[in-house]
């Protein structure tokens, strides 16, 4: 089976260059000198082909843009699985051409227009965020549908990673017919792995914040206060982001460090083993590999 991965840096586990690992053999193994993809290694050991179009720091809009470009590229392979890691909606995006994705010259210098986000009302902000995710996911679903109509057997799997995918966002993004071949593996894969052995921390596991890795939200905040009165910001938005920061720093990185080791900001080496296990389990249940 051919697996294609789209999204951001969550395809890899990250380590400090010249620190965590010493040998050149491992530090230069996969794509980036500070990253290793356990997912890629495991899938290849399972006799699958793996190709990644992931770009560290990519926004969800960028990911959708890359997937859409694939619709115009012919492939001799008839059956593929596309795995899409959800990433932040607040990151820079400039529609980098597909052929330049692995180039060192890629420049994300054109940011998403942050001041367009309305921070004056919590529910309005959440509705904006949901709408933005839904539009990008619909573009991906439409691309998969077009590829299938052209005779390709494509299945797509959404995975919440740096950004979570609320269940209602998936439901609104994928129509009933497309649900036969577009699946949601996890609203957030880290939280799914945490639930494998919640132990005495179950209540904290159950309260996993939606914005736990949305650190670039501060950019939106800074741009917004430049043009608006600070008192115009709904404090519930700020409180939710601050609570997510506390959850990440005071609970996640301490209790579940083993899942995210070594950098504690992505799935770590052990986390990717669990991820591939979840991915294969879904493929087996949905008979995707048959």
Image: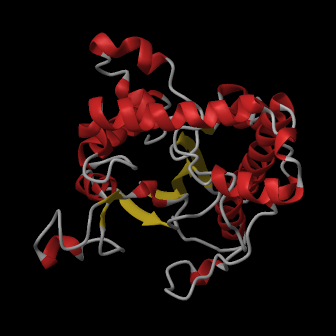
Residue 126 shows in the view: yes
Q: Quadrant of the N terminus?
A: bottom left
The residue at the point 64 percent across, 73 percent down is 74
Q: Is residue 241 left or right of residue 128?
A: left
Indicate the quadrant containing the C terminus: top left, top right, bottom left or bottom right. top left
Residue 178 sits in quarter = top right
In the displayed structure, would residue 222 be above or below residue 99? Answer: above
Residue depicted at 78% across the width and 34% down the height: 126
Image spot of residue 94 (x, y percent): 72, 74
Most extreme residue toward the bottom, as rendered?
A: 105
Q: Residue, x 59% and y 51% (percent of image)?
A: 87
Residue 187 appearing in the image:
no
Does residue 38 lie above or below 230 as drawn?
Answer: below
Residue nearest the viewer, comparing 199 with 150: 199
Query: Horizontal and vertical percent for residue 174?
Result: 74, 36
Q: Position of residue 15 (x, y in %)?
A: 27, 61
Instruction: Please name the residue shown 36% across and 40% down the image.
Output: 275
């Amino acid at each position: 089976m051919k697996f294609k991965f789209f999204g951001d840096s969550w395809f890899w586990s990250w380590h400090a260059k010249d620190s965590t690992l010493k040998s050149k053999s491992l530090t230069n193994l996969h794509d980036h000198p500070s990253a290793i993809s356990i997912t890629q290694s495991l899938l290849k050991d399972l006799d699958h082909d793996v190709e990644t179009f992931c770009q560290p720091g990519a926004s969800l809009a960028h990911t959708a843009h890359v997937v859409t470009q694939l619709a115009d590229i012919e492939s001799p392979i008839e059956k593929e699985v596309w795995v899409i890691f959800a990433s932040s909606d607040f990151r820079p995006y400039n529609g980098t051409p597909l052929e330049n994705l692995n180039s060192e010259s890629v420049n994300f210098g054109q940011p998403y227009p942050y001041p367009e986000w309305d921070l004056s009302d919590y529910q309005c902000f959440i509705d904006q965020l949901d709408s933005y995710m839904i539009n990008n996911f619909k573009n991906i679903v439409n691309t998969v549908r077009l590829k299938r109509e052209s005779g390709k057997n494509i299945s797509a799997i959404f995975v919440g990673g740096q950004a979570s995918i609320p269940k209602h966002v998936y439901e609104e993004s994928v129509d009933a017919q497309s649900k036969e071949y577009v699946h949601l593996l996890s609203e957030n894969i880290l939280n799914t792995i945490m639930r494998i052995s919640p132990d005495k921390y179950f209540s904290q596991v159950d309260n996993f914040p939606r914005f736990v890795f949305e650190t670039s939200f501060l950019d939106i905040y800074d741009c917004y206060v430049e043009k608006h009165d600070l008192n115009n910001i709904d404090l519930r938005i700020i409180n939710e982001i601050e609570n997510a920061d506390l959850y990440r720093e005071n609970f996640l990185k301490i209790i579940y460090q083993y899942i995210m080791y070594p950098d504690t900001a992505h799935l770590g080496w052990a986390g990717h083993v669990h991820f591939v296990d979840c991915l294969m389990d879904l493929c087996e249940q949905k008979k995707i590999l048959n």
